[in-house]
Image (cartoon, grey):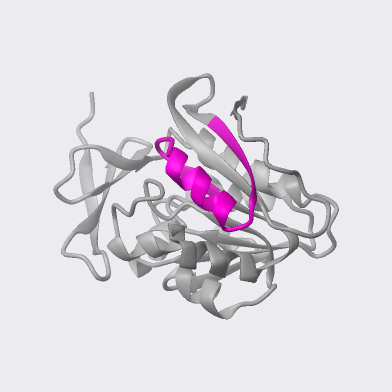
């Protein structure tokens, strides 16, 4: 088996840790320095695809849909959102670590089909929280895939996104009947309750890391008031992806 080769390191703003990009053949991996487990792998992105597909399905039929993706990663969530939207849709992706954007323009680009080159893509190099705080009724869907879930791992300030204040900001940046979709490596019933207290109708889904196998990841679909949106279903359903 080919060994992993370290391609690059990138400091995480506000942290003493770094992101490490590794390659083995045509497979890529991103890890946090000092952690054994992977943060993401180019062969395990089915749940990221599901995050985008589910969120975009909830806003299907809207003219000129505007979508915000928090976290570029390896580009899979961005690519799936672009694929699910029509030609008039626009996806803004916010990425905190500038080097991750450069990796996606370089060695990582082919993994997800180079979504940064799509003319419907807008890139914000900085914290997605800045956009949530300043943009009002700007997006039909907000997709958060910035960390391992509602507890920040790569960047402690990410915890704000999942706090009552962060969820209130997400509601304000959504258009009526918009959707907040959140990815997590693990379930978190406390976060489900927090979404409800923030005024969202909540669905909890699960999706596998790879089609038909791999870890089960959690996706929250939080529907904001107004428009045609679903109520709170409470239950967990698995999403199958081929």
Most extreme residue toward the bottom, as rendered? 134
Res 92 visible: no
Quarter occupied by residue 235: top right
Asked whether 233 or 87 is in front, the reply is 233
Place of residue 195 in the rendered image (x, y in percent of width and height, measured from the top left): 55, 51
Residue occupying the point 19% across, 33% down? 3
Residue occupying the point 76% across, 52% down? 59
Asked whether 94 or 161 is in front, the reply is 161
Residue occupying the point 58% across, 33% down? 205
Relative to residue 107, is residue 157 depicted above or below?
A: below
Place of residue 222 in the rendered image (x, y in percent of width and height, measured from the top left): 62, 49
Per the image, is 184 magenta?
yes
Give the magenta part as a residue range: 182-206
Per the image, is 16 magenta?
no
The quadrant the N terminus occupies is top left
Quarter occupied by residue 163: bottom left
Relative to residue 237, is residue 122 depicted above or below?
A: below
């Amino acid at each position: 088996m080919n060994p992993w080769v370290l391609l690059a390191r990138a400091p995480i703003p506000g942290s003493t840790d770094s992101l490490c990009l590794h390659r083995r053949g045509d497979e890529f991996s991103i890890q946090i320095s000092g952690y054994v487990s992977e943060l993401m792998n180019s062969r395990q992105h089915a749940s990221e695809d599901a995050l985008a597909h589910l969120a975009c399905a909830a806003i299907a039929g809207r003219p000129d849909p505007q979508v915000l993706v928090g976290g570029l990663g390896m580009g899979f969530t961005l690519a799936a959102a672009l694929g699910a939207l029509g030609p008039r849709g626009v996806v803004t992706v916010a990425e905190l670590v500038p080097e991750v954007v450069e990796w996606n323009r370089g060695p990582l680009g082919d993994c997800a089909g180079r979504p940064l080159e799509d003319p419907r893509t807008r890139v914000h190099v900085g914290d997605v929280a800045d956009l949530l705080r300043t943009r009002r009724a700007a997006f039909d869907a907000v997709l958060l895939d910035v960390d391992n879930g509602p507890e920040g791992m790569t960047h402690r300030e990410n915890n704000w996104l999942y706090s009552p204040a962060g969820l209130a900001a997400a509601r304000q940046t959504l258009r009526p009947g918009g959707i907040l979709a959140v990815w997590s490596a693990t379930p978190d019933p406390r976060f489900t309750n927090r979404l409800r207290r923030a005024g969202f109708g909540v669905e909890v889904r699960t999706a596998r890391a790879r089609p038909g196998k791999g870890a089960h990841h959690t996706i929250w679909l939080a529907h904001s008031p107004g428009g045609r949106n679903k109520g709170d279903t409470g239950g967990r359903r698995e999403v199958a992806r081929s």
